[in-house]
Image: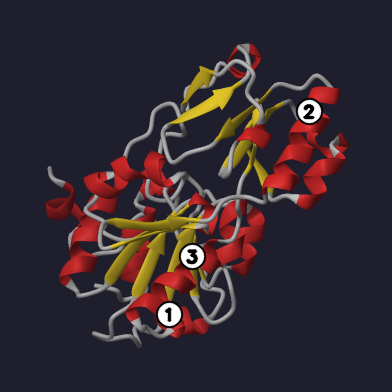
Amino acid sequence: MHFIEQHSAKLFGIDDELNYKNSLSLQKIWNMKRKYIFFDIDGTLVAGGYNKTYVPESAKVALKKLREAGHFLAIATGRSQAMALGYMRELGFENMVSDGGYGVTINGELVDITPLNKQDVIRVIDECKEKNIPWALQVDNSVVRSAPDNRFQDFTNDVYMQTEVVEGLDPANYDKIYKAYIACYEPTEYTLESLKSVPWGRFLKEYIFVEPSDKAFGIRRIMDHFGAETSDVVVFGDAANDLSMFVDGWTKVAMGNAIDELKQRADYVTTDVDKDGIYNACVALGLF
């Protein structure tokens, strides 16, 4: 039986122990007022991890119903714009915050991507060289990163994105650097002094991402562009890099599979991404 036939117009799969943090979440006070809803991708819109990613059918149904209700929908991801384009197109989004908040796409067109501070990245890479730690860079908006040799790929066996070898790779030779990748197991990253001056996060056990982590920055840019009230923002997330958009004044929804810190900040905790979390939250909050 198709999802929308089986589950239309009802809330399902939510454990009675999942309570609202704020009684405001229980009230369908929004009526038909337009909301500006921003979704993280991995672990929020998309299930299955990085190896077996898929979009739950219930999430697709929810997006369709949200559009029919007149809401503004956008992605807010740590992925590079190029790495997120596939999901953007598949799911019918026209607006997106990418690159951890530093990239903005409006009406299907990339506005810009703010790079990392070049000198900070150079210091990180210099320390990696001194300590013989494999590394790679993303120097353009693409689905490919660059490494000076095969050591990064040999260490990580990564399937998240393609790695190409560029002999003599030197961050000093590039005007813009959007991300860096450091191959190491926890807790090696805490021995790197240079990481104290850059935003970074670990999403895979084999390496860390040196990348922007300020999704709220990109969300505010989009809201400013459309002249919309930030009080109408609703955000969905699950991971540490979503903390930056779980700000006061916005409605914050944490997935059931979210980290504890995000759940503590959330106005509402829904079910897991693969247990109809997006759909359940939308019904509970009266978004359709």
> Residue 83, position in %: x, y?
40, 39
Along the polypeptide, which appears first: circle 1 or circle 2? 1
- Of helix, strand and loop, which one carries label 1? helix
Circles 3 and 1: CB atoms closer than 8 Å: no
What residue does disc 1 label? 26
Q: How many residues crowd around disc 1 within 10 Å: few (fewer than 14), some, or many (20 or more)?
A: some
Residue toward you, 147 or 70: 147
In the displayed structure, would residue 269 be above or below residue 221? Answer: above
Kind of residue at badge 3: Gly
At a point 53% along the width and 37% down the height, the residue shown is: 139
Number of marks present in the image shown: 3
Q: Is residue 39 left or right of residue 153?
A: left
Circles 1 and 2: CB atoms closer than 8 Å: no
Residue 58 makes an appearance in the image: no
What residue does disc 3 label? 218
What residue does disc 2 label? 128
At a point 84% along the width and 37% down the height, the residue shown is: 192
Using the rendered view, name the quadrant where residue 106 is placed. bottom left
Foreground mark, 1 or 2, reads 2
Using the rendered view, name the quadrant where residue 40 is placed. bottom left
Along the polypeptide, which appears first: circle 3 or circle 1? 1
Kind of residue at badge 1: Leu
Q: How many residues crowd around disc 3 within 10 Å: few (fewer than 14), some, or many (20 or more)?
A: many
